[in-house]
Image (cartoon, grey):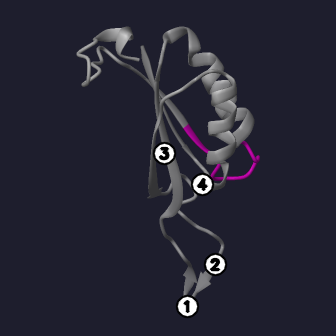
Amino acid sequence: MKMISCVIRPEKLVTLTDALERDQIVGMTVMDVRGFGRQKGDTGDVREGGSRIGLVAKVRVDLVVYEHDVRKVMETIVRVSRTGKIGDGKIFVLDVLNAMRVRTGEKGALAL
């Protein structure tokens, strides 16, 4: 199992969830987050004395998927989230050693 954690533009969330549902990928956690990358949050706005540095609003989506679905999910995220502009986001893939469904006690891949 793998956890795919991506940070994307908020306006891309509905499109992403619809595309993942069509790919039969279900179950995700979504969080509103703020941060900055290489551009340091520079939005091009000017305040007295220079550029405004701030935190940019994004959405973080976490999914735990079977290893064989990782490539498909990553391709879907890129396809629907890419604008070609700075701030399109990032995708991280992490190993998931175990999982447990709280309601039933199922473990491992059965918990997905």
Which of pointers 3 and 1 lies earlier in the amino acid sequence? 1
Residue at x-position 62% and y-position 17%: 71
Marks 3/4: CA distance?
A: 9 Å
Q: Vertical placement of 28 versus 96: above or below?
A: below
Q: Quadrant of residue 79?
A: top right
Query: At numbered mark 1, what does the secondary structure look like: helix, strand or loop?
Result: loop
Q: Amino acid at mark 3?
A: Arg
Which of pointers 4 and 2 lies earlier in the amino acid sequence? 4
Q: Vertical placement of 60 versus 110: above or below?
A: below
Q: Residue furthest front?
A: 104
Report the front residue among 92 and 103.
103
> Do tag 3 and tag 4 residues touch (Cβ < 8 Å)?
no
Which one is closest to the eye, mark 4 or mark 2? Answer: 4
- Residue highlighted by disc 4: 10
- Residue highlighted by disc 2: 45
Q: Amino acid at mark 2?
A: Asp
- Residue highlighted by disc 1: 48
Majority SS type along the magenta span: loop
